[in-house]
Amino acid sequence: MVTRRPARDDASRHLQALPDDRDVQAFWESVEAQLDDLAARLIAEIRTELPSYQALPPQEQNRTVRELLGAMTLSLTTGELPRPERLQMIRASARRRAYYGMPIYDVLAAFHFAHRGLWATFRSSPCATERLLVELVEPMAAWAQAMSQAVVDAYVAEQGGRDPREKEMRSQLFDALDDPARDQTTVDVLRELAYDAEGEFTVVVSRHQAWTRENTAALQRSCRRYAGVLQIGARAGLAVLISQGMAIEDLASAAREIVGPVALGVGLPRTGLPGIRASIVDARRSLEVTESTDDQVVRFADQWFFATLLHSAPELDPLLSAATASATVHPDLADAVLAFADAGYSLVGAGERLRLNANSVSYRLGRWKEHTGLDVRDFSDLAASMLAVRRARSAR
């Protein structure tokens, strides 16, 4: 008589089977293939369920969520706990959310959504086995605990020692900004200051004389009422304001309220640490334009042509010296040049600006040509004429 063993159900057999390396690799590949879609779903869920997350730029949230999912899966693949550098990035991300005024329980809830979503992805994988999932329970719990602790630590630090810590980090940022050898440190400092280090920055500069220590500190505090991040420092006789996510109109208005009527040069929005350096250059050149106009705020995006030419003016001096002298001696002719350009090369429009008839404007432009040899109806000569006029006025 043959004794038959009792049949075991499929789940039991699956639990007992040890997955080989190929099965495990197939499982993680199937998970990796779903992470982009998972990140998109999580972001939609978080922004719907947690309204405070509307303050966070969607592209930044997309990147941080996707990076977190990738880091978690990579760590779980190798059976490691979160590495210190990863926890540091989680703390930096939490500090940025604290800077935006987002409640800590919302941030913790968002991490819970990510944890829950990743676990659901594991379970739905066609390559998942019960034994493999069981082995993931403990490291997943360790990840959740480590992330929660990192968030709490960040919020405690932000609330308990924000001003002294921020002052220290701000000093490090401006000290290291011009040293490429310290780029990784500078990126870490940017994150400590609640910036998105890979995001877009806009730099604003102003002459430093009006920016007393008290004014700078007051503006730093005042701008916390606006969305975005701002840090203010001094470099080469200039006040440098590194802004991210803040409306320049709000920043300019706050500066006028606290510092007074100061000229501001605004750089192009640019990405990452190299973008900060490039935007500083833009802003400095834009500030030079304010010295030859009545505009207190000049954006490089609007005045890039003259901002660039004014920076190159010393090299062009042999071409411009006579015209610059004429603009100084004959300001009425210089006014006609600017009015003609501002009116879209229209004599009638220039006359309306100067309250003259078109013939009078034409006469003055003719005299300008006699004195300088520059015909404003030619683009190159018009550009040289305008640059000479601006140089003359900035020297007054």
Image (tube, rainbow, N blue to C red):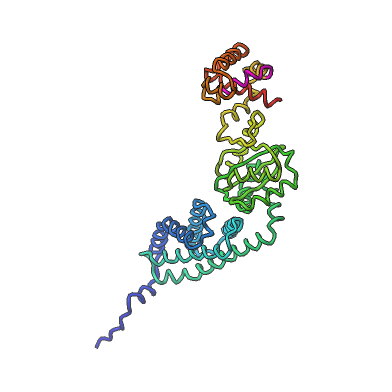
Task: Kindly give the residue lying farthest to the left in the view shown.
Answer: 1
| Direction from residue 197 to residue 37 in the image, left or right | left
Q: Which one is nearer the viewer's eye here, 346 or 211?
A: 346
Which portion, as a residue range, is magenta? 328-339
* Residue in the picture at 55% in, 62% down: 107
Position of residue 131 measured from the top left corner of the image (x, y, whole percent): 42, 71
Above or below for 206 versus 7: above
* Residue in the picture at 70% in, 25% down: 395
| Direction from residue 114 to residue 105 in the image, left or right | right
Position of residue 138 measured from the top left corner of the image (x, y, whole percent): 50, 71
Task: Kindly give the residue lying farthest to the top in the view shown.
Answer: 370
Rendered image quadrant of residue 333: top right
Position of residue 6 measured from the top left corner of the image (x, y, whole percent): 31, 83
Can see residue 278? no
Q: What main secondary structure does the magenta stretch of the protein show? A: helix
Task: Kindly give the residue lying farthest to the bottom in the view shown.
Answer: 1
Q: Which one is nearer the viewer's eye here, 86 or 346?
A: 346
Q: Which one is nearer the viewer's eye here, 122 or 15?
A: 122
Position of residue 143 measured from the top left corner of the image (x, y, whole percent): 53, 65
Above or below for 68 versus 128: above
Rendered image quadrant of residue 242: top right
Can see residue 207? yes
Magenta segment includes 331 = yes
Above or below for 202 versus 149: above
Magenta segment includes 319 = no
